[in-house]
Image (cartoon, helix red, strand yellow):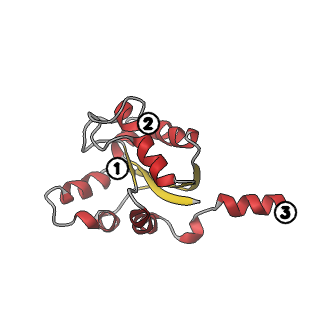
Amino acid sequence: MERTLVLVKPDAIQRGLAMEVLGRLERRGLRIAALRLLQVDEAQARRLYSVHEGKPFFEGLVSYITSCPIIAAVLEGPHAIEAVRRTMGETAPSAAAPGSIRGDLGLEISRNTVHGSDSPESAQHEIPVFFREEDILSYERAIDRWLVE
């Protein structure tokens, strides 16, 4: 079972699209293992985007993700990272396929509605920015427990 981080970004929150974004991912077969509505602070934003530090767009990323509340989620499922990436679509909404989240709902590359970890290494770096391990529920463990009871 693989885990990935998904962020419903400020533009999606402002436009009332949070449940649409999460619903598409759930309908894909992924399970929500952790979920938070939060205001990202500057330290979290810099930690999240640390791989981009020093690039010309870094400060813009920090400013945008801290501009209004977001929803952070850990999704779980077989090949969760790939499933989320395909469901989200290309980073630039203009290049994203119709039917993908960004293709249908994204406005521009800097306001593309949703973030998802792009690799297992990224997920391992990004998830702890928003969640402690004890905040994350594992469906495998829960199902095993339900079957025993």
Lower sequence index among marks 3 and 1: 1
Q: What amino acid does circle 2 point to? A: Leu
SS of the residue under disc 1: loop
Q: Which mark is residue 17?
A: 2
In the image, 115: left or right of 107? right
Q: Position of residue 114 (x, y in %)?
A: 38, 45
Mark 3, residues whose alpha carbon is within 10 Å: few (<14), some, or many (≥20)? Answer: few
SS of the residue under disc 2: loop
The residue indicated by pointer 1 is: 68
The residue indicated by pointer 3 is: 148
Q: CA distance from mark 3 to mark 2?
A: 38 Å
Q: What amino acid does circle 1 point to? A: Cys
Residue 60 or 96: which is nearer the viewer? 96
The residue sitting at the left extreme is: 56
Q: Position of residue 60 (x, y in %)?
A: 20, 54
Q: Position of residue 112 (x, y in %)?
A: 31, 42
Mark yes or no: residue 72 visible. no
